[in-house]
Image (spheres, helix red, strand yellow):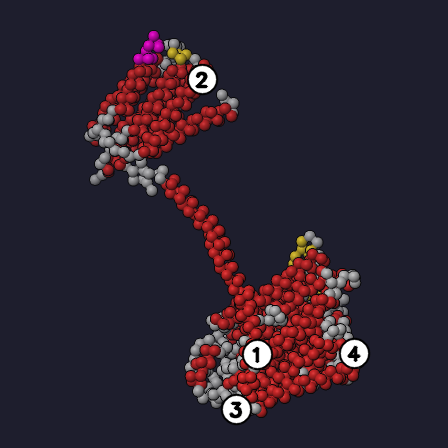
Amino acid sequence: MNSSLHLWLIPVIPFAGFVLNGLLGRKLPKALVTAIALVATLIPFAQVADIWFRLNGISLPYIEHAGTWIQTGAFRAGFDLQLDHLSMVMLLVVTGVGFVIHVFSVGYMGHEEGYWRYFAYLNLFMFFMLTLVLAENFLLMFVGWEGVGLASYLLIGFYYLRTSAANAGKKAFVVNRIGDFGFLIALFLLIWHFGTLDFSTIFAQVAQHPEWQGGFLTAIALFLLLGATGKSAQIPLYVWLPDAMEGPTPVSALIHAATMVTAGVYMIARTHVIFNRSPLALTVVAIIGVATAFFAATMGIVQTDIKRVLAYSTVSQLGYMFLACGVASYASGIFHLVTHAFFKGLLFLAAGSVIHALNGEQDMRVMGGLWKKMPITFWTMTSAVFAISGIPPFAGFFSKDEILYQTFLSPGGKLLWFVGLVTAGLTSFYMFRLWYMTFFGETRYKGASLAEHGAAVHASSTSKLVLEAEPEGHGHGGIHESPWVMTLPLIVLGILSLIGGWLGIPEAMGGHNAIGHFLDPLLGSGREGSSQLALTLAAVSTLTAGLGWFFAHLLYFAKPELPEVLTGKIRGVYALVAHKYWVDEIYGALIVTPLLIVSKYLLQGLLDTGVIGGATYGGAYAAQGFGAIVQRVQSGNIRSYAGWLALGAAVLLIVTYFGFTAHFGLR
Amino acid sequence: MVPISYYLILAAILFCIGVAAFLIKRNIISVFMSIELMLNAVNLTFVAFAHQWHQVSGQIFVFFVMVVAAAEAAVGLAIIIAIFRARNTLNVDQVDLMKL
Amino acid sequence: MHLVLFIIFGGLCVAGALNLLFQRHPINAALSLIVVMSSLAVLYLLLGAEFLAAAQVIVYSGAIMVLFTFVIMLLNAGSEERTHGSKAAYAIGIPGAAALFAALAYIFLSNSKSLSTAKLGDYIVTTSDLSRVLFRDLLLPFEVTSVLILVAILGAVALARREH
């Protein structure tokens, strides 16, 4: 009925960009590399926007079969892409925010030697993420799922000459792999029970059997959840995300804030039909979500690296999205996903702008006083800080508030609501702390002593691998605003951080909740409560956010000597939080070290060297030894040859006469 | 009235003595002579069987064996002369360069 | 009569062969071999092979063994030295030869009933019979052997030439 939308083009064009830049980028001029990368991202965005404007003329869900992948027996998996309300929203976010961040990267990574490599990987990431979002079956989604993990590894370890970056990339990939293991088990269970991996078939079957509650559906849901915790950095698999800050800052913005980490939330929303049948799984999701949110927020309070604060903030905000899904209010989770993409992306990009201006400095303790020197960065970041803290009318307020409202209404949700509320206060506190430390106060960054500071900065910088005593390009005139190619994306996202929430203004405040209604046909509507309750809760959240701001103002602007006094009083607790609750060390001791020991001594020592090596070398030695023995026959001595000849002749005669002729009856 | 088998056994005895001589002798020329002995034993076998079955082809065979033996003796002795010139010895045990 | 002749000349053959085996000087071995060959010629006569008996004496005793003797004299071969070259020859070879003889003897003896007895004058092949076969049915192999002899001559001359 419809003309073909050519959905397959959406992921394929970035892939073409990856191939071109990957194969030829090293030799191409920088302008051409930039053009390829930007065009490869702009075209999908244009296509998605076009579809969006034509959306009323398309019957959803629209499924496109781009070919069969596996066909064995009764099982078929195809390259099937689908467009429905959920994937429409995700497509807009991924392509839109993706394009904006690509533009920012042109400025941020302009001086890098691996410029072409960076954009190739970034386009590769876009390809996989779009595949993930457009997939109509679990298998194709898994392809995208794994692929974004790969792209993340490549980009985290972009500065591959740095050991810490390489290790961070490895850690991200390995931890993700653990989650993917859960995802795989879920896939096997799905094939076992349903015989197919197509979304439409599975969900239809589940819908037809209302008696299927819990049981194997709980198992599937829990394993899917394991995969989601890996990808979306929730407890227990969140440990890779803070380390992932080793990658370039735009990567952190795109992958570890706006898109890849939200894949887990998207997946849960996509499979909500299964989750709805398992109250146990939903409870687990909610608890993990809110616990992670609180836990990460406490760690964010004490971090001194600006990107680390934002990393823990991402983990915390993802916890909110999980909480939303856990109380079966998937639409609000997706709404928060969208606003989070705006303001977290902006936060990272603005941080990148600051880092770029300070020649790679990331420690907030040596920042300060930048609001006059970098106005655009300052105002856009302010927009994002207000948004994430949940201050109306900025974006985050509406989405976070919706989640908390739905949590409050859900059975047994009041405790979860309370923890979420406290976390919101903590969020506001540490974001304003970041705001004050970075932009206000006296300028602690000493530009004059850049000569020796520059060398140290560059050794720890994220933007140069070569030690230089002279920082290039910024030695003149001290700190200044970033070029327009970097500030324009900031402005775009800044505006979205302000108005993005207006998509979902609830009716209680006089809005239409456009995004909620848009996602209704797919995800079902949330719970309804009285508008009085809604307004009360909204007021409470705003108050909490304001409290967070107040304390941040007190500790980091008005009385900056106060934090040291306070930490002195709670030294033990402070040490615990500052060391991230020793989680990395615990994982290392409990899991990593035993695995390494087993690998080294058992698998490598015993099996590899001993058994396999032994068999191989043993075979070689045996052949050698046997050969050495047989070799002695060839002595060069004619008489010994004659001896063997005589023996052989006798044997031949006997065998022929007594064996051969008898066999053929010639005797 | 001699049974043919007597001739055959005589030939077998000669052949095996030839093999033993081949193994024991240390002079190249003696070894070569033992080869000739073996060939003669085989000739006797052929002639005996030719008489046994009244076929002339046994004797034809002997004829050709003789021819080839003659040719072989000529060439073989030439080789022995060449070896003697190169190694200055006629001892079989000292001509053992073709070894590993 | 036949049997007596057979025993005498057969015994001579074996004696000559054993002498070949046990003599240390090659010239003695060569002379014993001449005895063997001549006795074999008589045995051929007993078996009715006239031409072959003559050829045996002329070619083998008269040419080949003379050639051997010439070479022994040319190379001034002396008595054999007592060198121990190979254990395999004694350890494996002698049992091998013995096994060979045992097998052959067994085969011939166990089949002796299917073999007839040789009578003097029972089957005599005249030279003309032989030549009829050679020059009519086997003409080509006959001519090829002459080429073979030519090649052998050339080879012998080339191999034994003194290098300058």
- For the record, the magenta segment spans C1-8
Residue A16: image quadrant is bottom right
Q: Which of marks 3 and 4 is nearer the N terminus?
A: 3
Q: Mark 2 lies on which chain?
A: C
Q: Where is residue C88 in the image (x, y as percent from the top left)?
A: 34, 33
- Categorize mark 4 by other alpha carbons within 10 Å: few (<14), some (14-19), many (20+): few
On the image, numbered disc 4 is attached to which residue?
A: A529
On the image, numbered disc 3 is attached to which residue?
A: A442
Residue A387 visible somewhere in the drawing? no
Q: Where is residue A655 in the image (x, y as percent from the top left)?
A: 45, 27
Do marks 3 and 2 share a subunit?
A: no
| Gap between marks 1 and 2 measured at Cα | 109 Å
Q: Position of residue A135 (x, y in %)?
A: 67, 66
Q: Which mark is in front, 1 or 3?
A: 1
Q: Are marks 3 and 2 in contact (CB under 8 Å)?
A: no
- Give the residue type at disc 4: Gly
Q: Which mark is in front, 3 or 2?
A: 3
